[in-house]
Structures are given as C-alpha cells and as structure tokens.
Amino acid sequence: MKKKLSALLTTVVALILAVIMASGCSFVSDSKQGGGAATPSDSQIAAQTVNFETTDKPRNIEDAFIDAVAQVKRTSVQILTNSGSGSGVIVDLSFDETDDRYDATWKHSDNIIFIITCHHMVSTTGSYGTKGVGVIEVHLPDENFDYENSDYIFSGYIGDDRPSEYNSQGYAITLVGGDFESDIALLKLDLSVAATSGNKLSKDKVQKAQIPDDTYDVSLGETVFSIGNPTGTMPGSVARGIISYLNRSVSVDEIGAMSLMQIDVSTNPGSSGGGLYNLYGELIGITNAGNTSYTNINFAIPCYLENENGFVEIAKQLGGTATNDNYGYVSGRKTKLGFSVVENDDDAENPFVYVSSVGSGSLAYNQLQANDIIKTISVSRNGAQIISQSVSTLAEFAAVMDTLKAGDVLTINVSRSSWGRPTQSKTAQIEIKSFWFCDTGYYPE
C-alpha cells in the first residue's frame, strides 16, 4: 500500500512539474550564501511579458472625422431666397410647453421637421422688426447626397402674414420665429405638403442632427467640422478645423455685440446657418460670421451659453412660444429703435452725441433725423418717470439704452439745425416694443 501511494505521489509531482515547465512561468531563485541549489519560492513569481496581436486598434482623428461626416452629412440643407442663399440644419428638437396659450398641434406632428438657420438669412429690416424675405426654397440632400432631387426640394414664404395663413396657402416651408439678437431663426417643414416634384417625402427619408445635452463642454483646440453652402452654390461642402477661442466678444454687422465661438474652419458667404459638429457627430454650433480682412478667423453661435443665448435655448423659446396665430418670440427682446448715434469728441471739454442715421420704417422714423444733437433723455415706465438726464457721451447714452424694457416710453430732446433756419428744439417720443419677427398684431395676453 505504501509503495503504491509513494508511486502515485511521484507521478502527481511529475505532472505538476511538467505543467509548470510548459506554462512558461518561472520561479525566482533563492540562492544561499556559499552556493547551493536553488529552491522554488512560493511567494515570488516573475510574470513574463505576453505579446499578442489584435485588429481592434484605437481610432485616430481621421477615422473619427470620416465617420462623423458620414453620420451627419444629410442634416445640412441649402436655403435660397430672393435676397441670397445660405444654409440650415435639420434638428431633433422638442419644446417644453407649460402655457396653453402657446399650444399648437403642429408642434407634435410627425410630419413637421424643424430647421435651424440664421435670422439674417430670412429677414429684411422693416417696421417694428422684420418683414421677411418673401419666397423661400429649401433643398434637402437625398440618399445620394444630391441637392437637386425635386422630391427633396420644398418651397415656402416668409412675410407679414400670419403663419396660419401660410398653411392655408399650402406652403411646405414656414417660419416658426426669428431673433435678431442671437441671429437664430427656426423654420418648419411640413411633410404633408408635397415637394416641388408633386410627391410627398416620407419622414424616414429625413436625417436629423443630434444636439448634446447641456452638460457638454466645448474644449479649446477641439477638432470640429462644418457642412454648409459656401458661395451659395456649393451645398454639402465639408470643412474641418479647431475651436480657436471659446467665448469671443465680437461686434457683428447689423446685429451688434455677440459672444461666439471662434473657429478656424473655412467659411464663406452662403455658409451662414450651417452646422458645426464635433467628432461624435453632435451639432455644437451654427456658423454665422467671419472676418473678411483676415483668413481663418470665423465664428459660430454655440449650442449653450450662460446668458441663454445659445442656439438651443433660443430655438426652443421660439418654438415653445409660437402659436397658430403668431410667430414665436424670445422673452425680454426689444425692437430696435432704428437709429445710430456718434460721439463728437473733437473738443474734449465739450463732447456731444448726435444722430448719424435713421432707418426707414423704424420706431425713430419721422421723429429723429441725421445730425440731430441729443441734449436730454428720459424714460417713463408704467406712467412714472424713472430716468431724466443730459447726455454728452456715448457711454451715458448707452447706459440709458441698457435700462429700457418693453413698454417703456423713451423721450429724446434734440437740437436741430437746418439750412436757412435757426436752430430748433425737437422732441421724439418712442414707445419701446417687444421684438416679434413681424408685427401681426396677434400677441399673447
């Protein structure tokens, strides 16, 4: 019995040693002083380097870029109007409607597709805000990335009439609302109305851009790309670059001060309203401005801003406040007064502010005129005067303008000189109005 057990143990030990030798593991020698045989250590095992091959290589920027473009390329549209051409982006957008006054069944229809573009693409200056560009045509890319497929081309009209009247005339493209201060406008495409081919397009043929949630932070130096319509005749053009600066304060022609993302992505006239995407294929900006004196200095409206002027917040406000009878609006916006002022500081001790121009049809039209020298200015709110002061510098004038709210009454006293007539004192009284894309007269209570 003992011999059999001894033989069995010998066999087991031999098998264990064979497995150890075959496994590639090695024991660390524990050499005794003066030499001697090495003995196995049961606590120190040196792992051998293991080399293996895999086809699952990490993606580089080129691969990510190509994949992202393929994912979103059909979200970009071409917009044509009587006054020019530009770009837009089909977006996946929903609205938080907490007020029954703003309810409209079309907002929840599967046939309604929303398109974000720039306000300046769909507007012309008019009384109390904007009159619109008239006839508009929107070209969607088909499955082959073709923008001239008549099954994907839709027409509409943007003007003074109410949106419900547009729909009664059978327009596929209508305006939801526009905001000059953020330079964002929201269009809607009604797929229940036929395309220019006479055929109706199925909703599953339309690709929508995804918007990141408000936790997404754009990074300085982040790789981004745009898809737009440079020159107005090259829809679907892709350009790549980086975020050059996160929140650049700039002054944009006919809009004024804006906080924008600076990008080195190539943009040209016609690119306005196009999408700026990250490498995840998410829509993070709307391209709207560029510096014509320098190359690679361009700008985009961010998806989110602390002052809620990002394109996501603006588009949701425009859609959320739109009704069957009127356009959507952004709370707190004021209609532009329609005149510009300049400071004459040639005499440092006696500066003054004068009117340099007055827009036709503006709130100040027929009340102020060029070269009027502003003497005093006052503001009344709810029938009570809250400001009354003299004005001699642009800083003083701007400070008063910043306090204005819709419903205030602005009174400006000026000194006016005319050829052959003595200097006269004139008074302009202007009621500050809320900004609506068009003054339709249908306002919420």
Image: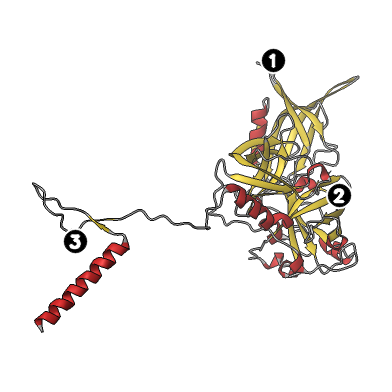
Q: Is residue 112 above or below residue 363?
A: below
Q: Are marks 3 and 1 in contact (CB under 8 Å)?
A: no
Residue 444 in the figure: left or right of residue 198: left
Residue 77 in the figure: left or right of residue 96: right
Residue 237 image offset from top left, x and y in percent:
75, 47
Amino acid under label 2? Thr
Residue at the spot of label 1: 347
**In the image shown, does 100 or 19 lie closer to the viewer?**
19
**In the image shown, does 181 or 209 lie closer to the viewer?**
209
Which residue is found at the position 88% from the left and 68% from the top? 199
Q: Which mark is residue 42?
A: 3
Distance between mark 3 and mark 1 Cα atoms: 95 Å
Residue 171 in the figure: left or right of residue 303: right
Q: Is residue 132 visible?
A: no
Amino acid under label 1? Asp
Which residue is found at the position 88% from the left and 65% from the top? 170
Q: Secondary structure at mark 3?
A: loop
Mark 3 neighbour class, 10 Å CA radius: few under 14, some 14 to 19, many 20 or more:
few
Amino acid under label 3? Asp
Residue at the spot of label 2: 81
